[in-house]
Image (tube, grey):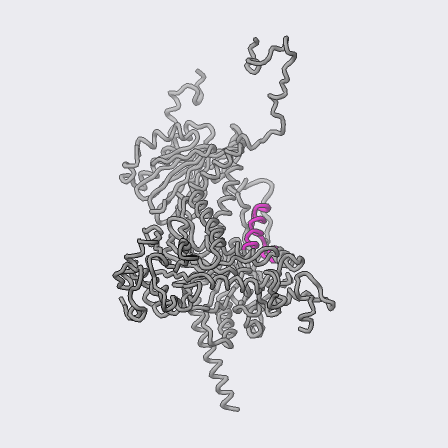
Amino acid sequence: MTSIGTGYDLQNSVFSPDGRNFQVEYAVKAVENGGTAVGIRCKDGVVLALEKLITSKLLKPEANKRIATVDRNIGVVSSGLLPDGRHFVSRARDEAADWRRLWKGPIPTATLANRMGSYVQAYTLYSSVRPFGITAIVGGWDSEADVPVDGEVGSGPKVGSGGKKEGAHGGPYLYMIEPSGLYWGYYGAATGKGRQIAKSELEKLNLSEGNLSLEEGVKEAARIIYVAHDDNKDKEFELEMTWISSVDGPTKGRHEEVPKEIREEAEKLAKKALEGDDDEDDEEKMEE
Amino acid sequence: MNHLPQAWGRPRDDVYGAYDQSHFQMGGPNQHTQSPIVTGTSVVAAKFKDGIVIAADNLASYGSLARFTDVKRLRKFNDQVVVGFGGDVSDMQYLDRLLNSLDIRENYGSDGTPLNAKNLHTYLSKVMYKRRSDFNPLWNHLLIAGLDGEDKPFLASADLLGTTFSAPTLATGFGAHLAQPILRRSIPDEAAVPNVSREEAVLLVKEAMKVLFYRDARSMDKYSIAVVTKDGVELKQDEKLESQSWAFAEGIRGYGTQVN
Amino acid sequence: MFRNNYDNDSVTFSPQGRIFQVEYAQEAVKQGSVVVGIVSKTHAVLAAIKRNAEELSSYQKKIIPIDSHYGVALAGLASDARVLSNFMKQQSLASRLTYDRPIHLAEITARIADRAQTNTQHYGKRPYGVGLLIAGVDSKGPHLFEFQPSGVTQEMLACGIGARSQMARTYLERHLEEFDGSSREELIKHALRALKESLSQDKELTVDNSCVSIAGIDEDFKLFDGQDMAEWLDATFDNKDGGNEGGQEGEAMETDEL
């Protein structure tokens, strides 16, 4: 970074002569050191996974959950500064609750992503605040079924005018929001330290074809976290995984933790796949 | 001195001139939340040895008009609490949304302990009391039925004034007058509860619902009934009153075809 | 005056993505005297070293009871801890009043964490200069949380923060396996021994300079201070003088296993 020290990087919301906002770029640096986070949009659900580095032996195992639920059907995982991640989630929950108060139904994942993008962007606008030191992956399932309006206590007349419109839309959604407030929709998203490896692994899955099932997605997500961690072998980590399925899937449209048995099975396969890779590498070397 | 009470004790008009009566006019718009519009009638509930039965009919009346006939007035909160609503239906819907948002907040974490009936009753009674203290009451009488922290049956009420009350059997509205004595005949006090079986309690509550349908002109014969035990909530929302007998009506003035 | 241009306030990232003001606030925690916390299957315990400013002054408050089911131990700026603990007391009472339910420790920890985070993202505020250990029992059993000025909170099995706390943590790591099954008494002894580890050679634990607290399943949070400490110090260090002066040498205590 050539312009470091020229003074344009000391304050948020200030452009440098070549049109950059350095404080936002530095915030991105904070993300790049965080544990790897991955999101996969499958045909019948969304998986979120996180590499949680163990910083101390004294930490309580399996506690300290970091993938958060927003409303009932949306999950957020982030990489970067932990407290900023909590701030982000808390705002997302407020947005979802406000939406419900107004529209008496769940916020669409796309709308939430949009609003959170705006919120994060606002923290790049003023010198009185600093940008978010996180990149957040937002995954959700918008119900494909007819959801009752909040507070509905009866079904209305069975005959006469009115009636229901066919073809309600819904399905899996996945977005990633960066410290600048920029966000895109993704088939597979990765952030944090191992994002490069994770991204190349995600690309191999041909997610845009929409064939990957949620069950396979869980296994792939676990494997990708393990692969991405491989460079960082000396540090121990815990895998945290959540998912959201369709209404008739295992989570009934809710964002939940992946059950322990399924996660452990996925981890076993991930470890096996890693060992396999290592063997191949060794073989290749031998051949060389 | 005249017969108008508001004039008593005030300066005499003939001595001091006309009294400024404008102080008596409150002015401002009418607040229609200050009186119920579409209403549900009684909710009845009874404890038994390892749970609670609660019931309410499916009618929402607009004055004396039977306006909506499939309104569900029992709301399952979670696997151990059901709330029954009597009174204004739109206020009930507001409370329903309030409980919905509470439930969402309670389930952000995957490892929380769910709110039990006692917790929920405390919360709802605070909501009711706050609103009455703001002179903007939620026009409802609620029964909160379920299990307390020790998995024992819990039944308590909270009304539009924020008043709370607890008893082994409870009924709101018309039921407080008509059903409560019937319920008390079988379950007079807390000591009687351990001797009441689930079947007996269900039968008793259904009987109370029937009597209410006989005598409450704002009731109907379709109702919801829920049983809460350690095994969860069993909620049926489309029940019909069985084996009615209107023979008693013959002997009562004002019923049926009699004129005098 | 400043070490670099990026450490003036808490709204400036360094080119490496660090926030120096927050890191400096963490240093304030290390200036405070050491506090230790441990949980078992049934109990949560806190222990602390108390300092006095001068011979004639009183010793500082290190453990603050918040609600009947939990309390906090602090290291760093005591006045910041007072602000946070007052907030915790209010929130805890609110939970009891509106839901008739003791607040969950994870919940109250999250609430102070959110407050602390705000101080690291807005100009004109400063991060809290205090670290806390939050220990007690709720409907999910005993818990111990660590709170840092950055707003990071973590649930721990055992933890030590403050001056020379590394020594205490080393002790805790070495005995980590024993804690889960420990009895109430054993747990307090472990906490006091961990505390002792972080003391310089010429210092001793006394009834004046130490305190412990305990909360358990069906046992309210209780703070032992002053003369109440005597029996714990006696029991832990085989110290017949009531822990006032002298006592055993550090060497002997090392070998004093249960």
Residue A11, horizontal then vertical, whole percent: 66, 62
Query: Farthest residue toward the front?
Result: C56
Which residue: 32% across, 51% down? C219
Give the quarter of the image for residue B28.
Answer: top right
Q: Which residues lie in the magenta part?
A: A90-113
Location of the C terminus of chain B (image quadrant): top left
* Count of marks, rendered view: 0
Q: Is residue C257 above or below residue A169?
A: below
- Along the viewing direction, whichever of B15 and A234 lies nearer the viewer: B15
- Along the viewing direction, whichever of B110 and C208 lies nearer the viewer: C208
Per the picture, the main secondary structure of the magenta-coloured stretch is: helix
Residue A141 in view (yes/no): no
Q: Is residue C56 above or below residue A161?
A: below
Residue C55, horizontal then vertical, whole percent: 40, 57
Q: Is residue A274 above or below residue B12?
A: below
Give the quarter of the image for residue C136.
Answer: bottom left
Location of the N terminus of chain B (image quadrant): top right
Residue C153 in view (yes/no): yes
Q: Say left or right for C110 vs A107.
A: left
- Along the viewing direction, whichever of C202 and C115 lies nearer the viewer: C202
* Residue A111 on the magenta segment: yes
Residue B179, horizontal then vertical, whole percent: 38, 30
Give the quarter of the image for residue B82.
Answer: top left
Q: Say left or right for A163 vs B237.
A: right
* Residue A26 on the magenta segment: no
Residue A172, horizontal then vertical, whole percent: 56, 60
- Along the viewing direction, whichever of B103 and B73 lies nearer the viewer: B103
